[in-house]
Amino acid sequence: MNEKFKSESDLVDSFIIQYEKKYSGIFVKELPIRYGNIDVVRIKNSALPFSMEQIDVLSRPSAALIFTKIKNERPISRNSIEKNVGLSGSTIAQTLSMLLSTGLIEKTDNGCFFRKTKFVFPKTMVVGYEAKLTDFNKAFYQAKGNKEYVDYSYLVFPLDIAKRLVERKRDLLEHNGIGLIGVSETRTFTLLRATKTSKMKDSVRLLGLVKANQMIN
């Protein structure tokens, strides 16, 4: 075990305290957006035009998915929704009912749906960090999996471990677009920069934003 950090929790807390001094945005620990949570997520520009009741509804994956398929101005039929979301008919019916009852969407006279609450994605940036004391393999596969949920994915290790990893694992990390950050007792060091992923879907971005807003409000 690393002498400077007695636990991963200590490493995470030290990382956030120091990183907040350098970078803007909100920091959320253990964001429950995938199975197993993401250790730390930083979101730049996280504001949403929704009430807390609407945020609670949109924190359901089915609601976030259907809401992103429905447009602001162009009504969409239920048949079109069913073809595009891959959910059961009962789940779609229940989700549409929740979206209607909270004023997120509206139904036209001919049975189509459009957003009652107008929404355009803010220019957000979502960065995920997996922090470990020594376990590179676990951190790497978690960070690789995170690329479906974030714009940039990083590993965070104590600085002495991170320096060794950048020598031994540089090619693997660069090939997968994963960044590496080292943390000392007083500073953070970005040893490898992550490349932006193109895997994150709109519904996943919205889900991350609403879950983060739930946790900070």
Image (cartoon, rainbow, N blue to C red):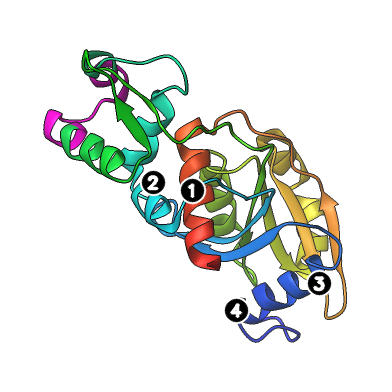
Residue assigned mark 4: 9
Q: Earlier in the sequence, mark 4 or mark 1?
A: 4
Between 51 and 128, the residue placed more toward the observer is 51
Can residue 113 be found in the magenta stretch?
no
Q: Which mark is residue 50?
A: 1
Q: What's the residue type where badge 4 is placed?
A: Ser
Q: What's the residue type where badge 2 is placed?
A: Leu
- Label 4 – label 3 distance at C-alpha: 14 Å
From the image, state whether disc 3 or disc 1 is nearer to you: 1
From the image, state whether disc 1 or disc 2 is nearer to you: 1
- Label 4 – label 1 distance at C-alpha: 32 Å
Q: Earlier in the sequence, mark 4 or mark 2?
A: 4
Q: What's the residue type where badge 3 is placed?
A: Gln
**Image-quadrant location for residue 42:** bottom right
Query: SS at mark 4?
Result: helix
Residue assigned mark 2: 58
Residue assigned mark 3: 18
**Which region is colored magenta?**
81-92
Which residue is outermost to the left? Answer: 90
